[in-house]
Image: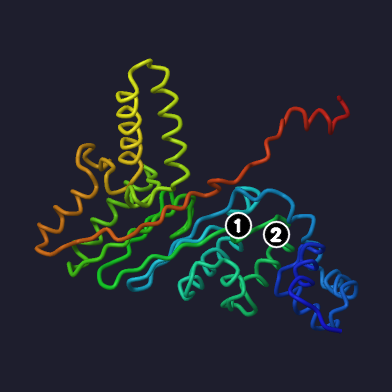
Amino acid sequence: MAYTATDVKNLRERTGAGMMDCKKAMDETGGDMEAAVDLLRAKGLAAVAKKSSRTAAEGLVGVAVSGTKGVAVEVNSETDFVAKNDQFQDFVRKTTEVALGQSSDDVDALKGAAYPDGGTVEDKLTNNVATIGENQQVRRMKTVSVGSGVVVPYMHNAAAPNLGKIGVLVALESEAGADVLEPLGKQIAMHIAAAFPLALNADGLDAEMIARERKIAAEKAAESGKPADVQAKMVDGAVAKFAKDNALLSQVFVIDNKTPVAQVVEQAGKAAGTKIELKDYVRFQLGEGIEKAESDFAAEVAAAAGLN
């Protein structure tokens, strides 16, 4: 019996098992959906289904560097307690190392990649969910690289080496030595962790975000009651300030609180006698953008005690 990619997707949705596990089940059962469901249940993999609906907003960010390439990976869990688990930390560390060997930032490709202990990353993830008892997700990854120079990793408030809640990578393109680039990269990484830039430069800022800021500025300008030409200048000024404050290269360096980051890099290049370019960066903060389910703990306790 033949099966399609849609069948595999449907099996995954029904069971909560990993994509590769679903494909194997369909292979073993000749494409029989119900038999595949039973097979996954028999293997204990379908038990993940209920856990997969729970919000995973805790976990760890991992960073790794090899030569002139670096990668950051975020792996989520439901509770901070699991993030302190040695098994979970080992998984994040090894998955981040696997990510270094990937040719793209495709999370599905990462999940399908070979895991050091055997099987795939997704196989190991599925096993962890079953044994630890919490939903876990490999959420995202980003790679940066340079032709020559360094990629400097930084972990703010590390939970373990290269693991924590805010992971940063700084890619510096230059012929300067590591003795110059490493400390510069570390300072810029600390700035990035603290200042939360939204893009490398103004051109990289999200167009929808800029449009939203322009709309807000226009509404504020309209309230001023000033002439239309003055309002237009007010709007342009507000948008320009937003871009300056949120693009890394134009942000004021937190170390001295006066010099734009671009100028800090330029001055370092002049001191080193060769150009230094801040080519790219990554800032992953654990759980950013994930909607956490809010709960009333007192109400939960009361309900459990039959007081409601």
Q: Residue furthest top?
A: 225
The residue at which mark 1 appears reads as 85
Q: Is residue 157 above or below residue 151?
A: above
Dot 1 amino acid type: Asn
Residue nearest the viewer, comparing 262 with 90: 262
Give how far across and how far down residue 218 sits, in percent.
41, 28
Q: Is residue 101 above or below residue 287?
A: below
Q: Callout 2: helix, strand or loop? A: helix
Q: Is residue 283 above or below residue 258?
A: below
| Mark 2 vs mark 1, CA separation in Å | 9 Å
Tag 2 near tag 1, CB within 8 Å: yes
The residue shown at (85%, 30%) is 305
Q: Residue furthest front?
A: 228
Query: Which class describes the residues within 10 Å of circle 2: few (<14), some (14-19), or many (20+)?
Result: few
Tell me: 165 left or right of 82: left
The residue at which mark 2 appears reads as 132
| Numbered badge on residue 94 | none
